[in-house]
Amino acid sequence: MKKFWETMIFVLSTFALVSCGDEDVKCEDVGERFCPDLIMCANLSKNTAWFEYEGEKYKCKGSGENIDCDKAFEEVFSACGLTHCKYESSSTCDYQVCTDENGGRWYEYNGKKYECEGTWDDLDCDRATDELNNDCEGY
């Protein structure tokens, strides 16, 4: 999810830089990263953003540098209903990082699940990553 937010911040900051006053809406398909057919849009002249998924709009709060899309992303991720996992590598092992529609996150390695505590903005993965690293390194 970190890469998504980095991409989104880049896109929105680019939109803000090219805003010239005329109403101009730009949209980007971000579905391959999260939910199929998920679109992220921004209104360049108003410096606002939203997600579109299955005909519904999920609007971000605020505008410009004060934009907050956490709630909108949480809602669209729930609507999507998918668990998303991707493979990561460290110097000692390969593992999966998974997220779900409820804001949960966990790691999977060698048939074992290492769950983070909390959800969305209140996510704490310290214990899970410590346990994962210990198992990867064979402690």
Image (cartoon, rainbow, N blue to C red):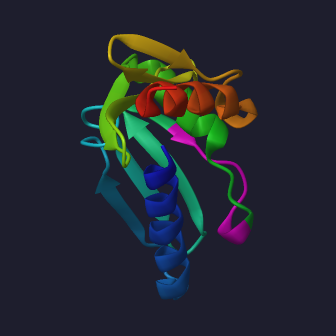
Write down the quadrant of residue 27 in the picture: bottom left
The residue at the point 68 percent across, 27 percent down is: 127
Q: Is residue 126 left or right of residue 56?
A: right
Q: Which residues are magenta?
A: 58-65
Q: How many marks on residues?
A: 0
Q: Residue at x 64, y 42 (%)?
A: 70
The picture places residue 99, in percent across and down from the top left corner, at: 46, 26
Q: Is residue 97 left or right of residue 105?
A: left
Vertical placement of residue 21 versus 63, above or below: below
- Residue lying furthest front in this view? 139
- Left or right: residue 60 versus residue 93 is right
Q: Where residue 108 appears, x then y in whole percent? A: 40, 21
- In the image, is residue 4 above or below residue 26? above
Q: Is residue 64 magenta?
A: yes
The verdict on residue 20 being magenta is: no
Q: Is residue 69 above or below residue 120?
A: below
Asked where in the image residue 45 lies, by quadrant, the reply is bottom right
In this view of the protein, can residue 98 be seen by the observer? no
Instruction: Give the camera-side residue of 35 and 50.
Output: 35
Any part of residue 118 in sight? yes
Pinpoint residue 38: horizontal percent, then vertical percent.
Answer: 33, 39
Q: Quadrant of residue 96?
A: top left
Residue 18: where, in percent of width, then height? 47, 86
- Tell me which residue sits at (24%, 42%) in the image: 32
Residue at the image position 67 percent from the left and 24 percent from the top: 119
* Horizontal side, residue 80 vs residue 139: left or right: left
Residue nearer the viewer, 34 or 139: 139
